[in-house]
Image (spheres, rainbow, N blue to C red):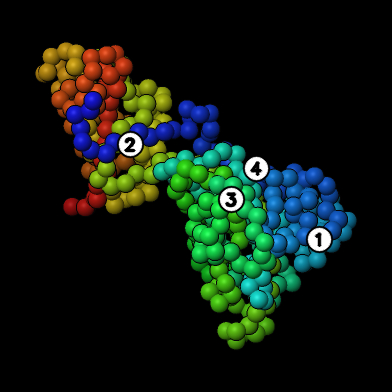
Amino acid sequence: MSLRFIHIVSITVFLCSGTTRSQNLVHNGGFEDFATCPVKMSNLNRDAEFWNAPTLGTTDYFNKCSKTKLGIPLNFKGKQEAFEGNAYAGLYLFAPKDYREYIQVLLKETLQKGHRYVVQISLSLSEKSDGAVKDIGALFAEKPLSIHTKRYLSNSNLANKEVQTTHAKQFLVNGFLDNKKKWMQLSLEIVGKGFENNLILGNFKSNRSTEYIDFNDESPSAEGYSYYYVDDVSLTYLGPEYKPNEVYVLDHVNFNFDRFDLQPKAKQSLKDVFVYLKKHPNLKVSISGHTDDLGSEDYNDVLSRQRAKSVARYLMALGLEKNRITAKGYGNKVPLDTTLSEKARRKNRRVEFVMTEFVDE
């Protein structure tokens, strides 16, 4: 039984499950692995390993091995070297009558609820495109999508499908994606909901809602073509998502008896906290140290302060400003588990933190 009536969230760190933070969770993100060398157009499903089209849109796959119009650098849409390696995909992000093409890939593992990830792609506008767009997005699905349409996928029509999906989220861009010579790098941060197994990329807006510029026709009703090459798709783990004013128990910061030194896994958990605080300069952190029920009250008060200070010192050593950290010890006054077992005592030998809005004085 816990004596605390507050929301406590344990932070799961991927090092426990063997996943490294730099690992790309997208299978074949560079499109290098293929079943057969491209011969015919509309060939993504047939030729590229792990990738497919989730709709009836005829998405293309290009590879340097091809001697047809699906080669690299020369192909039926112009000339472009791969961002890296020998292959990339191609799809329409804008076309008359709301025609769209998408690419879909199975992830290496299900995303963790409440954890942050970043999607990164390299994009290049094909030379034969009539115009350029600002709109490209990503959504995630529990199961692979297979939708019988050639038109755009909106959040509303996806909500009516049996497969659970997230809402499409737009990559942030500074202007029109109009570079036909160099690859443009785009990124998008998301927070996992706990069911995502597949990533889908494309333009999820109608022509009317898409920001489009026609190079030959300046009228707002112009409906040309915007065809893009896509390469180097990655999804990598960033760390947990922390909410202000909620109490978090730091994962792996359960101290050995009568000790306040940090273990290696505890340091990795604290690096997650540090990275999050550096990305959110409006937040400060309050750290509280706790002990088990063994020992005198006075001694436990001192020990709990040392544990909180160990965490604070480590965060400052990583580069967090001193005025953004407070540390306090509570001894054994606020246990998570009151049963007199070794398991309960180890749980109580912990550090918690709360992030709150920071005001620079």
| Disc 4 element | loop
Between the C-alphas of marks 1 and 4, the distance is 22 Å
| Disc 2 element | strand
Task: Kindly give the residue lying farthest to the bottom in the view shown.
Answer: 219
Q: Position of residue 71 (x, y in %)?
A: 82, 57
Q: Position of residue 259 (x, y in %)?
A: 27, 17
Q: Earlier in the sequence, mark 2 or mark 4?
A: 2
Q: What is the three-letter code of the residue carrying label 1?
A: Met
Q: Earlier in the sequence, mark 4 or mark 3?
A: 4
Q: What is the three-letter code of the residue carrying label 2?
A: Val
Q: For mark 1, what is the residue?
A: 41
Q: Which residue is drawn at the image coordinates 74% and 72% (left, top)? A: 128
**Quadrant of the drawing holding the N terminus:** top left
Q: Earlier in the sequence, mark 1 or mark 2?
A: 2
Q: For mark 2, what is the residue?
A: 9
Q: What is the three-letter code of the residue carrying label 3?
A: Leu
Between the C-alphas of marks 3 and 2, the distance is 27 Å
